[in-house]
Every structure is written in structure tokens, then in C-alpha cells.
Amino acid sequence: GAVVSQHPSWVICKSGTSVKIECRSLDFQATTMFWYRQFPKQSLMLMATSNEGSKATYEQGVEKDKFLINHASLTLSTLTVTSAHPEDSSFYICSAMVASGTIETQYFGPGTRLLVL
Amino acid sequence: KNQVEQSPQSLIILEGKNCTLQCNYTVSPFSNLRWYKQDTGRGPVSLTIMTFSENTKSNGRYTATLDADTKQSSLHITASQLSDSASYICVVSRYNQGGKLIFGQGTELSVKP
């Protein structure tokens, strides 16, 4: 149980185009999902918190107009990288959170590798 | 400042050997501590979770310890296998932070035949 999928697993695009990444919780519902990016040899960096039915909360330094997040249902959140540039090339990972009592557990997706040419 | 520090940064061991990874944290209010394994190009996978009252948790060949007084944790890997080669990340949660996690930088483990 508690499986999170991401699609696509990798994408190559031209500079200036937009790319949409989907994050799905396959066997559970998640009111809260998170989006991270990870550069080589570095740990995950939180980009934004996505709550179902409301606007995402972005971390300081993350451009909300560039990284559009939509959490339309309890099992799906999408991240759209608008007008992508080479510096947006990175590994993007989502997670879906489940709360059990006071313990909140994030289940991570397999990641999406984005390469902008 | 809420921080998680791991050591060593990288480690190379021979297959079959044991190893121990360290994690020190300065996080408050502490909720729980997890160890994750992240294979290259994949998302993190949870190995163990420990709350304040737990000091040992095992998952197969992985054994995690927690000393809440000294704010230290360790992950011991027994009889290492080539498939254990990965990044091991120590992650701490705080109470009432909307689920946000504080990540360590990870220890890159390489198991050689």
C-alpha cells in the first residue's frame, strides 16, 4: 500500500516550452502533497506544499508563476514548469502525506527527471 | 536553527561488511525521525521511523537507534549487499508544521564486491 506514482519519469524539452508533471497517490487519498526538487549530490529541497482544493503554499525563493501547482483531487497533484529554461533542469519528486494520529508520513514518488535544452 | 547533520558524507565498504551511519539533529519540537534509502534516480523509500519514546527499530538488515537526550541517531547496516549502494537520508519531523520535513544531506554508501 501507500504507492505514489509520477508521470512522466523523464522528459526532455526545448527552452521556452512548458512541462507538466503528474503525481498520483494510487491506493490512498492525500489532502496534502509536496513538491521537491533535487540537484545532483544534494538533498531534497521543498518547493511547495499542495493542499487539495486550495492554492499551493510556496517556499521562499520559489516562483509561483513559474512552477504552477494544481491539486484538483485527493489523489492527483500536478506541477507545471512554465517557460522552462536550462537552469530548471533537475530531478523533481513529489510526496503524498498520510496522517495517523500525530504521526504524519510522506510517501515519495519515483521522481521525474527534467532536462531542458 | 532546525538542522539535521549526517556523517560521514560518503562511505565505501566491502560486500558482507557492516557499517554505521550517523545523524545529529537540532530540531524542536521533535516529532519523529526517519531513515530513508534513495537509489540513484529514484525517490526516497522509508526504512525506519522512530518517535521520541523509541530507541531502537529494525527493518531486516537495517537497525536504527535514537537517543533523544543527545539528539543523535544511527543506522546500522548488517552484512551489506551490493544493492545497499545508495544515499541514506536522515529526516526529522516537527510537531504542527503541516508535515514539513527537515532533511539531512545524506550519506552516500558504496558497497564494493
Image (spheres, helix red, strand yellow):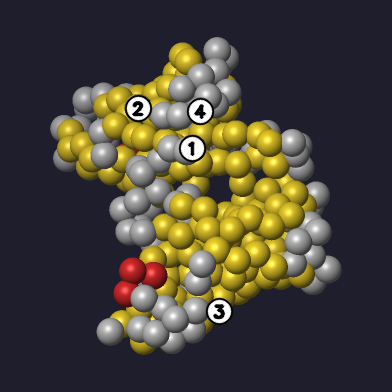
Tell me the residue that label 3 is attached to: B20
For label 2, the crowd category at 10 Å Cα-Cα, with few meaning under 14, some 14 to 19 and many 20 or more, is: some
Which of the image's four quarters has the C terminus of chain A?
top left
Of callouts 4 and 2, which one flags the residue occurring earlier in the amino acid sequence?
2
* Residue in the image at 73% along x and 46% along y: B94
- Mark pair 4, 1: CA separation: 6 Å
- Residue B20, position in %: x, y? 55, 79
Evaluate if marks 2 and 1 touch, with contact meaning CB atoms under 8 Å apart.
no
Secondary structure under tag 1 reads loop
Which amino acid is tagged 1?
Ala
Evaluate if marks 4 and 1 touch, with contact meaning CB atoms under 8 Å apart.
yes
Closer mark to the observer between disc 3 and disc 2: 3
- Mark pair 4, 2: CA separation: 16 Å
| Front one among A66 and A105 | A105
Q: Which mark is residue B14?
A: none
* Residue in the image at 43% along x and 64% along y: B87
Closer mark to the observer between disc 2 and disc 1: 1
* Residue in the image at 32% along x and 59% along y: B40
Q: Are marks 3 and 2 on the same chain?
A: no
Of all chains, the one bearing label 1 is A
Tell me the residue that label 2 is attached to: A22
- Residue A81, position in %: x, y? 33, 28
Tell me the residue that label 4 is attached to: A28
Tell me the residue that label 1 is attached to: A2
Closer mark to the observer between disc 4 and disc 2: 4
Of callouts 4 and 1, which one flags the residue occurring earlier in the amino acid sequence?
1
Which amino acid is tagged 3?
Thr
- Mark pair 2, 1: CA separation: 17 Å
Residue A54 location, quadrant: top right
Of all chains, the one bearing label 3 is B
- Residue B77, position in %: x, y? 51, 75
Closer mark to the observer between disc 3 and disc 1: 1
